[in-house]
Image (spheres, grey):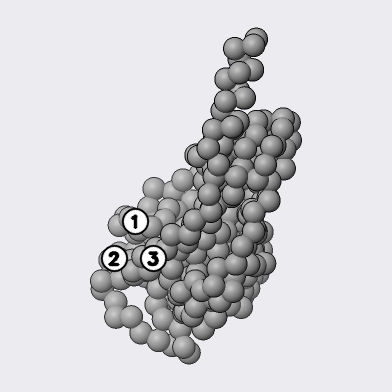
Amino acid sequence: MKKIMCVIFVVLLFSTCIFTNTGGSIDLKKNSNQQDYAIYQINGDELDQVNGGGNPTYNFAGVIPPASTVQSFKPTLNTLTRVELLCKMGANVSGELIISIRDTILGSDLTFVSVPISSLPTDHFGNWMEFDFPNISVIPEKDYYIVWRQTSEEFGPGWGYVPENYSRGEAWQTINDSVFNFSYDFVFRTYGYLGDNPEISIFEIKGGFGLSAIIANYGASSAENVNWSIDVEVDLGLILSGDHTEDVIVELGAGETMIIRSSGLRGIGSISITVQVEDVSKQATAFLLGPLVLRVREV
């Protein structure tokens, strides 16, 4: 027992975490599936992600409540303005079609638009239809989901899909809380723009020797005097030092990343972590062993 306590004591005293900031950049390149389309602007926005092009023979998938069809995608712009979907009405069905955007497949809608099913294209091979919902801020390179669902319990309207795989997302079908992978990808276009203001995001909380977080400015302009903090609370165990670190970043340029670190964190036990950057926060749990932060899991 004495040997074990001695080892723990040595680990607790080993090293002190220091605060450092290292700059980087975010790759905001367009997705390669855009090669058949020119990037153009309509009402100030531009084409971002797209799947389906040319003139293939499309198939269409329809659902009735409580099922829905879903296509995930990764935007490269920080404001999402609208989507276009290849669809057709099929049979003459009453009710509403609801197109929404989510950041988790079974989560709440971030934004949505509802249209009469009777307004969908009646073309035999379907046609593009615009769904212009209220704009939302999104995090580039994060997964988002286009969700297609209807109020009518009659089978009729369908969303076009093609065998070509969209490399930056997947298609799904859901029924209540069950999720099923769809082997093809749905045909869609997303539009957006880079906002004029800075857009701060906490990209990842990391462990190792000390605690760190990667933050990013996804906006189109620099962020100045950015306040940040890292707070650690013990759930079971002991924290000797470094439970709170805060500082100010003088400037974080558009498209830049930076690493922030806790200062002098030492202890042992299960911990809860909160990283705050201006009005953005992210939480995680971990196990602390001296200066080592292990098994970090974001919540």
- Within-10-Å neighbours for mark 1: few <14, some 14–19, many 20+: few
Q: Nearer the viewer, mark 3 or mark 2?
A: 3
Mark found first going from the N terminus, 1 or 2: 2
Q: Label 3, label 2: how many angstroms apart (C-alpha)?
A: 20 Å
Q: Label 1, label 3: how many angstroms apart (C-alpha)?
A: 23 Å
- Residue 127 placement: quadrant: bottom left
Where is residue 99? Give x, y as percent.
Answer: 57, 68
Q: Is residue 242 visible?
A: yes
The residue type indicated by label 1 comes to Ser
Numbered disc 1: secondary structure: loop
> Which residue is disc 3 drawn over?
25
- Please name the residue shown 50% across and 39% down the image: 209
Where is residue 279? Give x, y as percent.
Answer: 67, 67
Mark found first going from the N terminus, 3 or 2: 3
> Which residue is disc 1 drawn over?
167
- Please name the residue shown 60% across and 67% down the image: 248
Mark found first going from the N terminus, 1 or 3: 3
Camera-side residue of 62 and 34: 34
The residue type indicated by label 3 comes to Ser
Where is residue 44? Give x, y as percent.
Answer: 46, 88
Q: Label 1, label 2: how many angstroms apart (C-alpha)?
A: 9 Å
- Residue 2 placement: quadrant: top right
Where is residue 296? Give x, y as percent.
Answer: 56, 39
In the image, taking residue 175 as reference, residue 145 lies left or right, namely: left
Camera-side residue of 192 and 225: 225
- Please name the residue shown 58% across and 54% down the image: 104
| Cβ–Cβ under 8 Å for marks 1 and 2 | yes
The residue type indicated by label 2 comes to Ser
> Which residue is disc 2 drawn over?
32
